[in-house]
């Protein structure tokens, strides 16, 4: 077991491993409560008969999407719940009886903290033999009971088989429960290096199963042991290079957010209402987030029909990378460096500097420092004087 301790120590110190990149990630813990609330909604809809017969657009899709966003450990977690029309699995969408069984299973897991009751619920679900609903559903349980249930995917199973010399198979609840027992023993033996949260050891198994770390060989094979230690050293060096790359990327991200924070504060200082693009709103900035003190959304009175041939970049909420165009309606707001609408159907190439609103208390009542600033947006409504909006 000394070799396993050495492996765990290397894994904990590796900036590119799941311990530092996922298990210690602050956003990981924030999703536990929202996923629980989402599962409560799934149960309520199943009981009320309003869940529907499709995965797409369902409350379950929203929950699983939140899990799949949990970085590499849960990447592809939604595959198990996607409807496969040729195989008609998982059979919890069109089969009402199976859907009720699944709902009762989730309800039991939501209402208990007892390990024996959770295991009994798994056995009852397994007895129903619902096609396509295998241990991948244990990923839902992990976010309800992280000290009892552990995540489950192919890489984790491969890692456990490599370390424990087991032959756990995918798709079988019995194998999942047996693996859970074996993982529990390893976790207890190395408690000081791991955690009561089974996500920690699941991350270790994931890294081993995905090939990031070679599994420890038998202590009796000296040559294999020496080669394994050399592999660990190479992994450690790789982790150092990844850490430097991550630090450089993080520095660039922090600089970008810092400049946005300056623009936000400048807009507030000039007396403007500030709006932050949707994809930047939750960025950490100072002691809060970038959107603190800013508008939640553009005012509805600014909404009107854009010219059919015109694309409105601000209407896309700063998310032009994710959406190709604006359909139907758009905000009459544009960066001054480009243009601002002068009225319905009109789209001048520039906004005259003198048409900006004057503010009392500013010397000469002048406009903001520059009409070419990409962070300043102005709005003209039909029949109204121009009103301005600062966009960070």
Image (cartoon, rainbow, N blue to C red):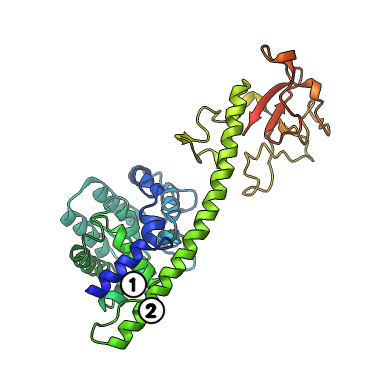
Q: In x, y percent, where is residue 269?
A: 60, 23
Disc 1 crowd, CA 10 A, few/some/many (<14, 14-19, 20+): many
In the depicted structure, whether residue 111 falls above or below residue 14? above
Left or right: 174, with 31 as reference point: left
Query: Which of the two labelled residues, at mark 1 and mark 2, occupies the earlier sequence position?
Result: 1
Residue labelled with disc 1: 159
- For the point 78% across and 33% down, the residue is 339
The residue sitting at the top extreme is 360
Task: Point out the image quarter for the C terminus.
Answer: top right
Name which quarter of the figure residue 174 lies in: bottom left
User: Closer to the observer: label 1 or label 2?
Assistant: 2
Q: In x, y percent, where is residue 109?
A: 25, 51
Q: CA distance from mark 1 to mark 2?
A: 20 Å
The answer to which of 354 and 146 lies nearer the viewer is: 354
- Asked if the residue at tag 2 contacts the one at tag 1, i.e. Cβ–Cβ closer than 8 Å, the answer is no
In the depicted structure, whether residue 132 falls above or below residue 275? below
Q: In x, y percent, where is residue 357?
A: 73, 18
Numbered disc 1: secondary structure:
helix
The answer to which of 329 and 337 lies nearer the viewer is: 337
The answer to which of 2 and 21 lies nearer the viewer is: 2
Query: Residue 32: which disc?
Result: none
Numbered disc 2: secondary structure:
helix
- For the point 34% across and 78% down, the residue is 229
Q: Is residue 105 visible?
A: yes
């Amino acid at each position: 077991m000394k070799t396993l301790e050495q492996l765990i120590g290397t894994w904990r110190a590796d900036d590119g491993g799941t311990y530092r990149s996922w298990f210690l990630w602050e956003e990981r813990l924030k999703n536990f409560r929202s996923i629980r609330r989402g599962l409560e909604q799934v149960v309520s809809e199943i009981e009320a008969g309003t869940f529907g017969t499709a995965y797409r657009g369902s409350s379950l899709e929203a929950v699983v999407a939140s899990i799949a966003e949990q970085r590499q450990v849960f990447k592809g977690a939604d595959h198990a719940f996607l409807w496969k029309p040729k195989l008609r699995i998982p059979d919890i969408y069109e089969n009402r009886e199976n859907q009720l069984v699944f709902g009762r299973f989730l309800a039991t897991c939501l209402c208990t903290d007892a390990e024996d009751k959770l295991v009994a619920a798994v056995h009852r679900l397994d007895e129903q033999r619902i096609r396509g609903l295998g241990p991948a559903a244990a990923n839902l349980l992990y976010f309800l009971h992280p000290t009892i249930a552990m995540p489950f995917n192919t890489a984790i199973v491969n890692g456990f088989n490599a370390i424990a010399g087991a032959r756990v198979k995918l798709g079988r609840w019995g194998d999942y429960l047996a693996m859970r027992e074996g993982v529990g023993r390893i976790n207890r033996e190395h408690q000081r290096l791991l955690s009561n949260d089974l996500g920690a050891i699941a991350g270790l198994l994931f890294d081993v199963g995905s090939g990031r770390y070679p599994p420890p060989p038998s202590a009796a094979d000296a040559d294999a042991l020496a080669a394994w230690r050399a592999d660990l050293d190479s992994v450690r060096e790789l982790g150092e290079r990844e850490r430097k790359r991550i630090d450089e990327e993080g520095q660039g991200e922090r600089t970008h957010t810092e400049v946005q924070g300056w623009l936000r504060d400048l807009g507030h200082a000039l007396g403007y209402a500030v709006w932050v693009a949707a994809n930047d709103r939750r960025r950490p900035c100072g002691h809060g987030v970038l959107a603190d003190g800013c508008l939640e959304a553009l005012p509805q009175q600014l909404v009107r029909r854009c010219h059919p041939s015109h694309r409105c970049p601000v209407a896309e909420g700063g998310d032009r990378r994710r959406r190709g165009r604006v359909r139907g309606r758009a905000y009459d707001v544009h960066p001054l460096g480009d243009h601002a609408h002068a009225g319905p159907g009109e789209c001048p190439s520039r906004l005259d500097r003198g048409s900006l609103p004057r503010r009392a208390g500013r010397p000469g009542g002048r406009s903001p420092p520059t009409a070419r600033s990409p962070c300043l947006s102005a709005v003209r409504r039909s029949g109204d004087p121009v009103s301005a909006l600062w966009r960070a």
